[in-house]
Image: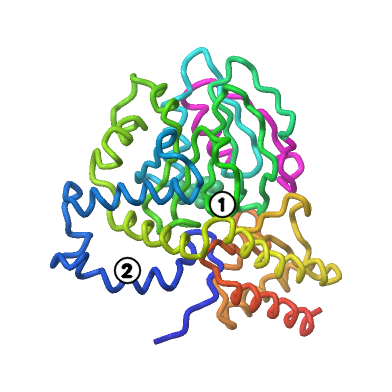
Amino acid sequence: MTTRLYNFNPGPAALPLEVLEEAKETTVQYGGRGISIMEMSHRSKPVEQLAAVTEQLLLELMGLQQDRYRALFMGGGASAQFAMLPLNFLAEGLAADYILSGSFSEKALQEAQFIGSTRKAASTKDEQWQRTPDVSSLQVKADTAYVHMTTNNTIEGSRFNVFPETGDVPLIADMTSDLLGRDIDYRRFSMIYAGAQKNIGPAGITAVIIRKELLERGSKHIPLIWRYATYANNDSLYNTPPVHALYLTNLVLQWTKRQGGVKQLEAVNRAKAALLYDAIDQSGGFYQGIIAKADRSDMNITWRLADKQLERLFVQESEQYGFEGLAGHRSVGGIRASAYNAVPVEACQALADFMTDFQLRHG
Ligand SMILES: *Cc1c(COP(=O)(O)O)cnc(C)c1O
């Protein structure tokens, strides 16, 4: 067998090796039933059970109570949520406030603009997203349908450390790249969504965590398939969900719990990111961090090399040394290491060592 790479892919991203091994074992036979889960009816007991326990486990890991929140699973990726959210909650006569902190937040706004009135509540676009907007004293008007933010900016490598006070207005977040990666007070949010392929599972499934009272306020004038209430009323089994992706997500969540949960993973993630940020900050300018220090993400660590030629060489050489996925997003260039929950400390240590070594040889 070939050895596994140090996987810093931004998404789809690294999955825990334990989970892959476990999934391999159950691929042909699930629960000793003579068929795999991919071949089972989504109306069967095992699949109903899988949906129910996965919902419970996700809420538990987030520290949310089952009597206040639902966790729903659906296809379409986080991008489908960009449209589904305003379809459900951007009613006429109201406006949705979007906090802009990077390109995914702009995409979320773009879709909402097809549906209803929107406002830019804050933005750091004219600073090339090098920091996240200060939202500590955000003013929320009475006619606001909801406030939307992206808690961690995957492409840019920044994050919010402070979340706005929105009073009775629902605060809604795209947490695709930091859900369960840090210990946020998830109770402050009325709705959270995340494509699974970064921190909680494989591609093909999206988690939507939503307050029950918000569910009831969703539009009744849109097709059933686009209503959150439809997914909630049918325990995510209204139509065929991505069953195998749900199964893998369940395995990742169990793994997350075995690691000690979110608090423990946050500490590990902090240490992992610090290895890379230290290598950047101690390089005497050879490596240059892109994001203002206070707003740096622990999930996506971004930097540049002063010399573009060397930057290309860095990525090329890194591949020879067994590192995967370090080229920055095509829209911004530079280098990006995505060190989600499943990326082991050893991978970050190896990358920090490689950075030092590369500088010695080429600096
Ligand atoms: C990856 C990502 C998306 C896009 O997710 P898809 O599942 O590909 O639609 C949206 N928002 C954030 C913050 C992301 O990191």
Report if the CB atoms under discs 2 and 1 are less than 8 Å apart: no
Return the residue nearer the eye: 295 or 337. 295
- Quadrant for the N terminus in the image: bottom left
Q: Quadrant of residue 16?
A: bottom left
- On the image, the x and y values in percent for residue 10 come to 54, 60
Residue 23, labelled with which disc?
2
Q: Residues within 10 Å of mark 1 (few under 14, many from 20)?
A: many
- The question of residue 114 being in magenta is answered with yes
Question: Identity of the amino acid at label 1?
Answer: Asp
Q: Residue furthest top?
A: 93
Q: Quadrant of residue 318?
A: bottom right
- On the image, the x and y values in percent for residue 125 come to 71, 40
Question: Identity of the amino acid at label 2?
Answer: Ala
Residue at position x 36%, y 74% from top?
Answer: 21
Q: Which residue matches tag 1?
A: 178
Rendered view: 298 above or below 27: above
Q: Is residue 3 left or right of residue 98?
A: left
What is the magenta range?
105-134
- Quadrant for the C terminus in the image: bottom right
Disc 1 is placed on an element classified as loop
Residue at position x 59%, y 64% from top?
Answer: 339
Rendered view: 43 above or below 225: below
Q: Marks 2/1: CA distance? A: 24 Å
Q: Earlier in the sequence, mark 2 or mark 1?
A: 2
Q: Is residue 255 left or right of residue 233?
A: right
Q: Residue furthest bottom?
A: 1
Residue 142, labelled with which disc?
none
